[in-house]
Image (spheres, rainbow, N blue to C red):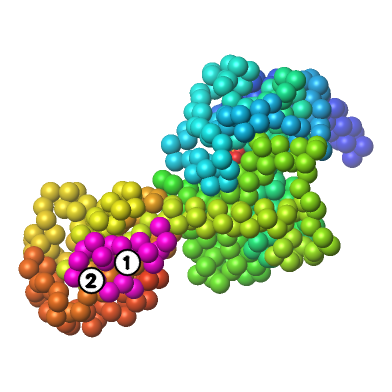
C-alpha cells in the first residue's frame, strides 16, 4: 500500500474520530449542566480513574500506553470544556448581564442587613471572625447540602453572601448579573440580593490574590508560573497572573498532561502557587511539591490559610524564598466582599483610584481602586486575625510553671488549653514519670511529638509543652506552622524536681544550661516567671496583645 493510500485511511479514521469527539463533548455539556445544577464539581477523579482503567482494558495490549495517554488528554479537555460551558453557555441561557461595577444591595446595613457565608462544611471558617473585624453587620454561617442550595438561593434569609467550597460554580446559574471577573473566572464567591429581585454575583478572589501578590512585592512579569490545582481559586490566580504579564502559566493537576509525576519538567518556574487544599487543616504537614529542585523559584504563595504556614511555606522559608500564606488573601477578598455588601463599591460609590501608576513589582501594586484607608484596614485585620488564630505555645524548664500559667492564660483569654504531658498520659494510660521509667525517654519523646502534632494543628489555643520539647527539631517545625512560642524562664535554683524524673536524674542546673540556648532560639518572647501564676499569665497576655 502506498503512502497516499495509507494517509487516506488515516484521514477517514480522523473524520470519524472528530465526529465522535464532538458528540462526546455535546454529552459533556449536558453533564456540565447537571453538575452545576446539583452542586457537583466538574472533576470527579474517582469516576475518571475507573473510566481510564475501563478504556485500557478495551485497548489492544501493545497500544495501551498510547491509548491511555490520548485518553488523559481527552479527559483533561472534557473538563476544560465543561468549565467553559458552565461559564459562558449558562450566562447566555440565564441571560446574565455582565457588569463592570457592583450594583447596590437590596438592604442597607444600617437597617439590619443579613450577610453570611454559604458552604457545605464551615465548622472551621474564619469568615465570621474576619467580617466582624471589617464591618458592623450581622454575619452568619449557612451550612447547606446541595439539595438545599436552590431553595436557599431563591428564598433564603440573607441580603448578601460569601460563597465557598463547593458552591462557587454552582451558584452561577442563579445570578441575574455577574461581574466581569466572575464571568472570566467562571466562579462566584460573593452574592447580593438586588433591589429589583435577582442575585448579583462577583468574584473577589481575584482582588484577594492580586492584593496578596502585591504585598509580597515580587514581580511575575515574564516569569514562568506554576499553579498547583485547576479549580475555582486556580482560575482567579491565573487571571491575575495573566493580567500582570506572567510568562508561561502551567496548571499542575493530578491526572492532566502536566502532573506531579513529571514536575521536574517545570523546575525552571519562577513562581509557585498552591491553589489546592493540600496542607490545609486537618491535613497539616502535606505538600504536593518539594521545592529542592526549583532553583529559579523567587516566590511561593499558598492560598491555604489554616495553618498560617503550610508545609510548602515552611519549605520556602527554609530555602530563603519570599513566601506568603493565604490569610492576607482571605482578608483582602473579604474586604472587597464587604464593600460590595455595604454598597460602597456600587455604581454610585467606587473607591477613589490611587494617584499615579505603580510598577508590577512594587509592594504597593495592589489594585488601582484600593484606597490607602482600605489597605490600612486590611492590614489591621490581618494582624488581629493572625493573633487570634495563632496558638500560644509555652516552653521552658520542667517546673517553671507552664501548665498552671497556660491554664490561667487560657481562662483570661477565653482559649482552649492543651498540655502535651497530659495528652501523652491520656493516650498511654499512665503518667510521664512511669512512661520514662518503664519505656525509656526516647519512647516518651515519640509520644510527645505525636501529641504536639495534634495540639499544634489547632488554632487559637494555649499549649503547655514538656520541658524537653526542644530536644526534637521536628517539634519546632510543628510549632512554626501556627503558634507563637513564649519561653517561661525561671532560675534553676527555683525549679522543683519532685515528679520530674529528668531533673532528678541530671540535675535542674545542668539541664537548664543545656537547654537555655534552645529555649531562646525557639521562642519569640521570653517572660520571667513571677511568684504568682496570675501575674505571669497576665504578662504573657500583655506582651502578645491578645
Ligand atoms: P476547588 O475548586 O475544589 O479546586 C480544588 C483543586 O485542588 C482542584 O484542582 C483539585 O484537583 C485539587 N486537589 C484537591 N485535592 C487534591 C489532592 N489531594 N492532591 C492534588 N490536588 C488536589 O477548590 P478552590 O475553591 O479552587 O480552593 C482551593 C484551595 O484554595 C482551598 O484550600 C481553599 O480553601 C483555598 N482558597 C483560599 C482562598 C483565600 O482567600 N486564601 C480563596 C479561595 C480558595 P482535582 O480536580 O484533581 O480534584
Kindly identify which numbered label has been placed on residue 539: 1
Determine the residue located farthest toward the front in the rendered image. Answer: 110
What residue sits 39% from the left and 51% below the top?
A: 460
Q: Nearer the viewer, residue 252 or 426?
A: 426
Kindly identify which numbered label has been placed on residue 530: 2
Kindly identify which numbered label has been placed on residue 270: none
SS under mark 1: helix
- Disc 1 and disc 2 in contact, CB within 8 angstroms: yes
Looking at the picture, does residue 160 appear above or below residue 132? Answer: above
Q: Nearer the viewer, residue 266 or 387?
A: 387
Ligand 1 shows up in the quarter that is: top right
Looking at the picture, does residue 194 appear above or below residue 451? Answer: above
Q: Is residue 493 visible?
A: yes
Disc 1/disc 2 C-alpha distance (Å): 9 Å
Q: Residue 249 appears at what percent x and percent y?
A: 73, 53
Looking at the picture, does residue 429 appear above or below residue 357? Answer: above
Within 10 Å of disc 1 (Cα), the crowding (few <14, some 14-19, many 20+) is some
SS under mark 2: loop
Amino acid at each position: 500500500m502506498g503512502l497516499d493510500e495509507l494517509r487516506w485511511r488515516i484521514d477517514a479514521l480522523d473524520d470519524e474520530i472528530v465526529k465522535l469527539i464532538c458528540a462526546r463533548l455535546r454529552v459533556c455539556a449536558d453533564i456540565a449542566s447537571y453538575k452545576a445544577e446539583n452542586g457537583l464539581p466538574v472533576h470527579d477523579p474517582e469516576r475518571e480513574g475507573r473510566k481510564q482503567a475501563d478504556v485500557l482494558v478495551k485497548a489492544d495490549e501493545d497500544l495501551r500506553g498510547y491509548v491511555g495517554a490520548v485518553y488523559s488528554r481527552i479527559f483533561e479537555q472534557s473538563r476544560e470544556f465543561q468549565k467553559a460551558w458552565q461559564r459562558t453557555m449558562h450566562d447566555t441561557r440565564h441571560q446574565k448581564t455582565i457588569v463592570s461595577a457592583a450594583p447596590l444591595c437590596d438592604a442597607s446595613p444600617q437597617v439590619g442587613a443579613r450577610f453570611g457565608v454559604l458552604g457545605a462544611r464551615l465548622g472551621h471558617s474564619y469568615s465570621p471572625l474576619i467580617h466582624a473585624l471589617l464591618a458592623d453587620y450581622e454575619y452568619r454561617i449557612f451550612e447547606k447540602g446541595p439539595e438545599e442550595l436552590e431553595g436557599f438561593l431563591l428564598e433564603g434569609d440573607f441580603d448578601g453572601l460569601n460563597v465557598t467550597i463547593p458552591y462557587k460554580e454552582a451558584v452561577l446559574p442563579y445570578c441575574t448579573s455577574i461581574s466581569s471577573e466572575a464571568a472570566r473566572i467562571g466562579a462566584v464567591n460573593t452574592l447580593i440580593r438586588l433591589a429589583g429581585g435577582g442575585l448579583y454575583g462577583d468574584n473577589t478572589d481575584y482582588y484577594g490574590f492580586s492584593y496578596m501578590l502585591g504585598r509580597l512585592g515580587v514581580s511575575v512579569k515574564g516569569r514562568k508560573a506554576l499553579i498547583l490545582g485547576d479549580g475555582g481559586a486556580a482560575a482567579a490566580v491565573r487571571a491575575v497572573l495573566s493580567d500582570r504579564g506572567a510568562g508561561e502559566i502551567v496548571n499542575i493537576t493530578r491526572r492532566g498532561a502536566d502532573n506531579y509525576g513529571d514536575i521536574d519538567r517545570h523546575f525552571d518556574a519562577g513562581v509557585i502557587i498552591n491553589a489546592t487544599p493540600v496542607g490545609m487543616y486537618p491535613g497539616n504537614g502535606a505538600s504536593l511539591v518539594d521545592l529542592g529542585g526549583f532553583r529559579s523559584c523567587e516566590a511561593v504563595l499558598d492560598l491555604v490559610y489554616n495553618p498560617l504556614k503550610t508545609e510548602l511555606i515552611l519549605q520556602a522559608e527554609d530555602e530563603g524564598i519570599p513566601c506568603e500564606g493565604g490569610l492576607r488573601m482571605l482578608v483582602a477578598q473579604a474586604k472587597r466582599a464587604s464593600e460590595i455588601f455595604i454598597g460602597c463599591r456600587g455604581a454610585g460609590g467606587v473607591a477613589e483610584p490611587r494617584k499615579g501608576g505603580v510598577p508590577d513589582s512594587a509592594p504597593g501594586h495592589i489594585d488601582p481602586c484600593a484606597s490607602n484607608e482600605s489597605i490600612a484596614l486590611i492590614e489591621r485585620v490581618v494582624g488581629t486575625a493572625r493573633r487570634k488564630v495563632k496558638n500560644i505555645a509555652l516552653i521552658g524548664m520542667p517546673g517553671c510553671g507552664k501548665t498552671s500559667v497556660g491554664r490561667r492564660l487560657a481562662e483570661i483569654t477565653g482559649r482552649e488549653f492543651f498540655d502535651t504531658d497530659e495528652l501523652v498520659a491520656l493516650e498511654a494510660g499512665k503518667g510521664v514519670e512511669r512512661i520514662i521509667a518503664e519505656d525509656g525517654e526516647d519512647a516518651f519523646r515519640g509520644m510527645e511529638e505525636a501529641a504536639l502534632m495534634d495540639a499544634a494543628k489547632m488554632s487559637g489555643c494555649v499549649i503547655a509543652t514538656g520541658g524537653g520539647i526542644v530536644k526534637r527539631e521536628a517539634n519546632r517545625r510543628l510549632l512554626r506552622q501556627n503558634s507563637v512560642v513564649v519561653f517561661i524562664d525561671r532560675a534553676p535554683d527555683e525549679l522543683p524536681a519532685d515528679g520530674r524524673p529528668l531533673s532528678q536524674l541530671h540535675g535542674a542546673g545542668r539541664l537548664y544550661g543545656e537547654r537555655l540556648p534552645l529555649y531562646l532560639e525557639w521562642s519569640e518572647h521570653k517572660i520571667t516567671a513571677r511568684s504568682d501564676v496570675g501575674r505571669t499569665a497576665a504578662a504573657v497576655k500583655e506582651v502578645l496583645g491578645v
